[in-house]
């Protein structure tokens, strides 16, 4: 089964890392992703740019509107995602908890499904 792991960061937290801490975290994350790839668990890993770089698209009455960034004042923001293959939720939670980002982020693990499933 597939599980989406969403890494929610304190908006101010990432700014507190020193350059060396940030570089070590990046190396640890690359090693973590490579380990998951070798074990067959990693389907997708993607870091995200800050929320201020986002656009929001809405369609209403056939009209498309695009606005800048998030509207809400948020304490946490979605910083990255991984999509993994795991036997069950317990395995997905174990995989997520080993991420180096777990030191900085809350990780939401959510089962995925295919719209073709019955």
Image: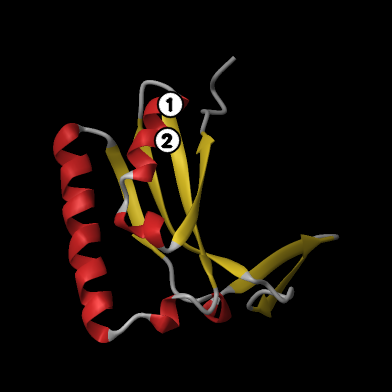
The answer to whether marks 1 and 2 mark residues whose Cβ atoms lie closer than 8 Å is: yes
Element at label 1? helix
Q: Residue furthest top?
A: 118
Question: Residue shown at 44%/74% (left/top)?
Answer: 49
Residue topped by disc 2: 93
Which label is found at residue 81? none
Question: Residue shown at 48%/75% (left/top)?
Answer: 13
- The quarter in which the C terminus is drawn is top right
- The quarter in which the N terminus is drawn is top left
Pick the front one: 77 or 94: 94
Residue topped by disc 1: 90
Element at label 2? helix
Q: Is residue 1 visible?
A: no
Pick the front one: 94 or 2: 94
Pick the front one: 23 or 53: 23
Q: How is the image coloured?
A: secondary structure
Give left or right: position of 93 versus 35. right
Q: Is residue 70 above or below residue 109?
A: below
Question: Residue shown at 65%/70% (left/top)?
Answer: 56
The image shows residue 26 at horizontal and vertical percentages of 24, 68
Question: Residue shown at 42%/22% (left/top)?
Answer: 88
């Amino acid at each position: 089964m597939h599980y989406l792991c969403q890494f929610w960061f304190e908006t101010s937290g990432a700014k507190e890392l020193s350059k060396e801490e940030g570089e070590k975290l990046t190396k640890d994350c690359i090693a973590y992703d490579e380990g998951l790839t070798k074990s067959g668990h990693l389907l997708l890993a993607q870091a995200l740019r800050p929320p201020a770089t986002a656009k929001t698209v809405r369609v209403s009455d056939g009209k498309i509107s695009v606005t800048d960034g998030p509207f809400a004042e948020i304490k946490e923001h979605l910083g990255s995602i991984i999509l993994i293959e795991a036997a069950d939720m317990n395995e997905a939670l174990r995989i997520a908890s080993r991420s180096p980002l777990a030191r900085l982020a809350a990780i939401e693990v959510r089962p995925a499904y295919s719209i073709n499933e019955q």
